[in-house]
Amino acid sequence: MFEQAFKNIDDVLWKEAGCASELDYAEQTSWLLFLKYLDNLEQDKAMEAALEGKKYTYILDAPYRWESWAAPKAPSTGSGQAGKLDHNKAMTGDDLRDFVDRKLFPYLHGFKQKASGPNTIEYKIGQIFGEIKNKIHSGYNLREIIDHVDELRFRSQAEKHELSHLYEAKIKNMGNAGRNGGEYYTPRPLIRAMVQVVAPKIGDRIYDGACGSAGFLCEAFDYLKAKPGLTTSDIKTLQTRTFYGKEKKSLAYCLAIMNMILHGIEAPNIIHTNTLAENISDIQDKDRYDVVLANPPFGGKERKEVQQNFPIRTGETAFLFLQHFIKSLKAGGRGAVVIKNTFLSNTDNASVSLRKALLESCNLHTVLDMPSGTFQGAGVKTVVLFFEKGAPTRKVWYYQLDPGRNMGKTNALNDADLAEFIELQKTFADSPQSWSVDVGSLSSAEADLSVKNPNGGEAIAHRSPQAIMDEIAALDAVSSEILGKIRALL
């Protein structure tokens, strides 16, 4: 039922002139889902309070609650319409659009000023509705979408689980829609493998300073929630003192909030900010984390004033993030970070200095080399760096992932592809795909980490002609798909 409701929503959004892409679909679905979720949450809390003989104070004033403006229900009159949409009260057309644009959104945005702190649900409401704009310009389309959203329920864990999977699929489709796909969507099998290697524990503070749609935080939550024997205190710790994220872009911030809510975290600790605008020399012990999991954006060019916040100055966004992550870890803290594989061998001053800083301040124990095509539409070959802060690197274990097929949209990465890596990594075992290298044997001048597989594979950080051809073919396929959609609209 939920899957059909999501499809119906997309079908209506496709007709809406203000929504031109999967990014718009995800954004517009998100704010409506959020308000429907909030209504269900408030009703549940009001019911719990009534059972305890207490009075519940609603977050939203009556005119702005879902049941008032979006889906007023017919009263019990013996007509058989009880609980169904009251068409006499339900707004539509221009009345509905004007209410949303002129009253609802300004009212919700005002919560940011009224909230007691940034980690409250009130603050999240104000932040989201200050960033998102209603792009559904037809009040009749909006009425139809609201009716579909109203079919969804967030009450049981099974319902939330199904909705979270559907929402993840929507984020994945959005990521696949363009060449910036990796910005919004990191393949979940890769995230799950990173989480398993880092092995977070209850009580750890887990951080992603470039959290995108919060895939890393959601998967880490699922991993910890599945631990046997969790106490009430453990669950409270997971809800309030475990997951922390920062995100610069408005759409990704809103996706992150909604994604974490659907996974079961009521008031996510996600801050809308430019992480790199913070001077890392200001990071104190109280600000540090036990675990960092991230896929920071790469290829960006940061301004000179942003670069001033870092000891190793560079325009490459990912290199600045890596410095931030190292500084943000506690002594003994564990990190797993996706980065372009050329980081291992670039000879520019910033790359060399950053590799040396990483090797000297952290134990870079594992490098996972990912195949081309891992990130749909992103066109970048990557590695994952696994490290522990506090002791220098003596030996690096490399694993060169080879799924035995060309990766792409129809041959996406799966959990089975990474099973051997996870198993061998526990003991740093040698295999045809894995080997260890003493840091002392590497070039000390450039700290070059690009190492040829001694078992006959290609060198990490250098791409084969076939890999380059595969990437060109993948990009051509993406371009053809986009052109096909444009022709269909003409």
Image (cartoon, rainbow, N blue to C red):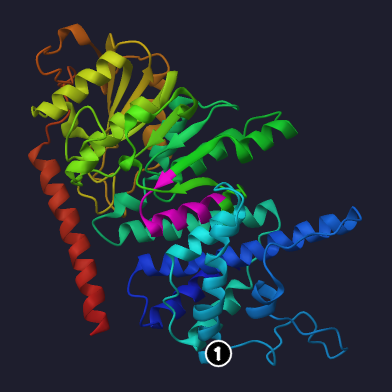
Whether residue 157 is in magenta: the answer is no
Residue 393: horizontal and vertical position, in percent?
Answer: 29, 12
SS assignment at label 1: helix
Question: What residue is shown with label 1?
Answer: 95
The main secondary structure of the magenta stretch is helix
**Residue 435 seen in the figure:** no
Q: Nearer the viewer, residue 278 or 362?
A: 278
The residue drawn where x is 50% and y is 26% is 286
- Residue drawn where x is 80% and y is 83% of the image: 82
Q: Is residue 121 left or right of residue 183?
A: right
- Say if 305 sits above or below 193 in the image: below
Is residue 9 toward the left or the right of residue 14 in the image?
Answer: right
Specify the amino acid type for callout 1: Asp
Q: Quadrant of residue 26?
A: bottom left
Q: Is residue 255 magenta?
A: yes
Task: Locate the C terminus and report the quarter of the image it occupies.
Answer: bottom left
| Rendering coords of residue 139 (x, y %) | 50, 87
The image shows a total of numbered marks equal to 1
> Does residue 479 sit above or below 364 in this rendering?
below
Read off the magenta span. 246-260
Q: Is residue 439 above or below residue 261?
A: above
| Residue 74 rendering spot, x and y as whole percentages | 77, 85
Q: Quadrant of residue 318?
A: top left
Residue at 18% in and 64% down? 479
Question: How many C-alpha atoms fall within 10 Å of the one at disc 1: few (<14), some, or many (≥20)?
Answer: few
Q: Quadrant of residue 123?
A: bottom right
Whether residue 105 is visible here, answered yes or no, is yes
Residue that appears at 52% across and 66% down: 109
